[in-house]
Image (cartoon, grey):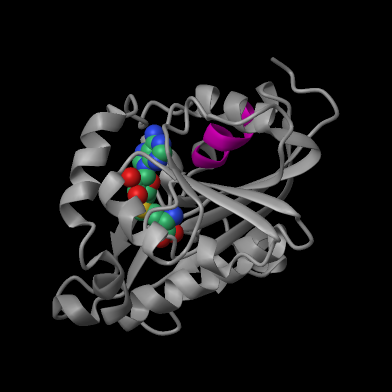
Amino acid sequence: MSGRRAAPPDPRDVAATYDAGADGYDARHAADPRRAHRAATLDRLQLAAIGGAQEVLELGCGTGRLLAQVTAPRRVGVDVSAGMLHHAAARGLAVVRADAHALPFADRRFDAVLAGKGVFRYLDPGRAFDECARVLRPGGRLVVHLYGGRTWTIARRAPASRRARVDLFEPADVDEIVAPAAAAGLGAVAIHRLRSIRVRPYLLEIPAWIDRAVPAQLWSHLVVVLQRTSAAAR
Ligand SMILES: C[S@@+](CC[C@H](N)C(=O)[O-])C[C@H]1O[C@@H](n2cnc3c(N)ncnc32)[C@H](O)[C@@H]1O
C-alpha cells in the first residue's frame, strides 16, 4: 500500500454524508455533461467486463444508477446509506443495507461483483477483497473502478472552467488494488487506464502504445478486472 492512502473512514460517517446528499444526487450528476459522459464511459467498461453474469452484486450501489443498467437475471445492491438505498429501491431494485466489509450473503453466490465510482476509497482493501472473494464463485469477476491520485492543472491562468487538468496515477495506485486482491485470491485479468482531461473528450482509454511510450503516467481512472481463482487465498 502506498503511504498516500489514509485509513478507511468509519462507514457510519460515510453513510451520514451520503444520507445528507441522497435527495437530488442523480439530478446533480446528470446536470454536468462532462460528469455524465465520464460516468457513461466508465459504466460501459464495467458492464462489458461482467457480460454473461447471471447473478451480480454491486458494492456501494447508491441510488442504483449503475445497477439498473445490469442486465443479469439476478442483481442486488448493498450500501451503508439508507438515504441512497431509498432511491435505489424506488427504481424497483433489490437492495440490502450492509457494509461491504461484512456482506450478508452466502459463500460463492455471485458470478460478478461491481465496485464502481471509486467506492474502494471508503474501504479497507484487504477486508473488502476477502469478502468479495468469499461471495464470488471460482472464475467470478470483481470490477473495481478507482479515481486518480493526483491532479495537474495545465493552464493555470485560464478561467477555472477552461483549465485542462490531468489527473495522474502513480504505479502504487495500481498496486494498492492488485496486491491485496491477489492476497485474497483475486487475480487481475485486465487493467484499463483512462485519461481524464477537463476539456472534451473528457475520458479516453489510453492505447497500449502510448502507455508504453510515454514515461509520465497520464491516466486518471483505473478499471481493474479481477477474477477469483479456484480457491480464495485466505
Ligand atoms: C460515489 S457513490 C457511488 C454510487 C453508485 N455506485 C454509482 O455508481 O452511482 C459511493 C457509494 O458507496 C457507499 N459506501 C461507502 N462505503 C461503503 C461501505 N463500507 N459499504 C457499503 N457501501 C458503502 C456510499 O454510501 C455511496 O452510496
Q: Residue at x 30, y 44 (%)?
A: 81
Q: Quadrant of residue 36?
A: bottom left
Q: Is residue 20 left or right of residue 114?
A: left
Q: Is residue 173 left or right of residue 19?
A: right
Q: Is residue 173 visible?
A: yes
Q: Nearer the viewer, residue 187 or 86?
A: 86
In magenta, the rendered stretch is 173-181
Q: Is residue 168 visible?
A: no
Q: Quadrant of residue 70?
A: bottom right
Given the current orientation, which residue lies at the most extreme right position? 230
Q: Is residue 44 above or below residue 228?
A: below
Q: Is residue 176 above or below residue 145?
A: above
Q: Position of residue 115 (x, y in %)?
A: 52, 48
Q: Position of residue 175 (x, y in %)?
A: 57, 34
Q: Residue at x 51, y 36 (%)?
A: 172
Magenta stretch contains residue 224: no
Q: Position of residue 165 (x, y in %)?
A: 32, 68
- Work out which quarter of the rendered image holds the C terminus and state it: top right
Q: Residue at x 66, y 67 (%)?
A: 71
User: How many numbered markers are drawn?
Assistant: 0
Q: Nearer the viewer, residue 2 or 47?
A: 47
Q: Is residue 79 above or below residue 87?
A: above
Q: Nearer the viewer, residue 42 or 163?
A: 42
Q: Is residue 57 left or right of residue 148?
A: right
Main SS, magenta residues: helix
